[in-house]
Image (cartoon, rainbow, N blue to C red):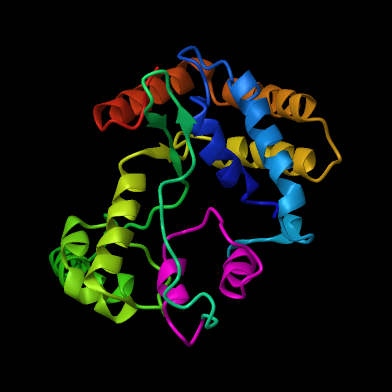
Amino acid sequence: ARGFAYAWWGNVFGSLGGAYFDRNMKPQINSPAGVKAIQILKDLEPYCPPDVMSFGYTELMNAYLQGRVATMIQWSDVWKKANDPKFSTPFILHNAGVSQVPGVKQPDGSIYFRAAAPVGRVLAIPTTSKHPKEAFWVASMLSNDESIKAVTSNDAGEDPYRISQFKNLAAWSKFGSAADAKNYLDAVGDNLNHIFPDINIPGSADYLDALDVAVTSALSGTGDAAKALNTAAAAWDKITNNLDANKQKKIYNAMLEMWKKHGFWKD
């Protein structure tokens, strides 16, 4: 659905080796990888529910839990719901699996894949806080002690994100056997170690909105993939220039170096 279609495109684009910009801030979303990513998604449409273009998180989740689709790219918390009789159908219950996102086979036989990481949740203390130390201890309690309750609950919709949560197999026992829990956590961890991060520089919301318009129009049949992405790339150039291209270049390159340091990026 409009507003977040770019994230599903990002899984494919990233796995094809795509980059948002080159090192000089020239947009790369309209590269052959960008166009091919849209084409791959379009090729999948005949095998999707007919109303797939209106799908957001909830619609996609329900389509899976109701047995309308066999596989999907989705947040990993759906695995918990698939193993909960309150949400799942008998056919799906305890039959759901999680794997890495699809990737591209390399000459050495390995699979290069990147899982889109478009959302993060953080706890922050404003500089105007009158009780920063107390706020820190509350944040610490929520992160260290209470977070395991949230990620193992079907009321919160959160995915595991702390190393301690991946090591605590017993906390996931309500959703299946220890082997099931380990398979789930291993797959989630694998994706987290191969992420395609969201662009995170000044103007990000504007960049991503222009990209989302392009992806949505191309997938809906109202626009040619290359033409739509070229239009988005021109919009990206305008955003960059309005925000000062030299400053954007410096910030973007610093961001890429951070991603490279953590193994999420290669030039």
Q: Position of residue 189 (x, y in %)?
A: 29, 51
Q: Position of residue 34 (x, y in %)?
A: 62, 27
Residue drawn at 25 percent across, 66 percent down:
179
If the image is split into quadrants, where does the C terminus sit?
top left
Q: Which of 139 and 5 is in front in this view?
A: 5
Furthest toward the top, the residue is 24
Residue drawn at 21 percent across, 64 percent down:
165
Q: In this view, does 51 lie above or below 173?
A: above
Furthest toward the bottom, the residue is 86
State the extent of the magenta-drawn residues as a range. 58-87
Horizontally, is 93 left or right of 223 in the view? left
Q: Nearer the viewer, residue 32 or 203?
A: 32
If the image is split into quadrants, where does the N terminus sit?
bottom right
Horizontally, is 49 left or right of 137 in the view? right
Residue drawn at 46 percent across, 59 percent down:
75
Q: Is residue 176 above or below residue 101?
A: below
Q: In this view, does 18 lie above or below 157?
A: above
Q: Where is residue 225 in the image (x, y as percent from the top left)?
A: 76, 30
Residue 28 in view, yes or no:
yes
Q: Does the magenta stretch include residue 180?
A: no
Residue drawn at 41 percent across, 75 percent down:
94
Q: Is residue 69 magenta?
A: yes
Residue 124 in view, yes or no:
no
Q: Which of 34 and 259 is in front in this view?
A: 34
Furthest toward the right, the residue is 222
Q: How many labels does the image show?
A: 0
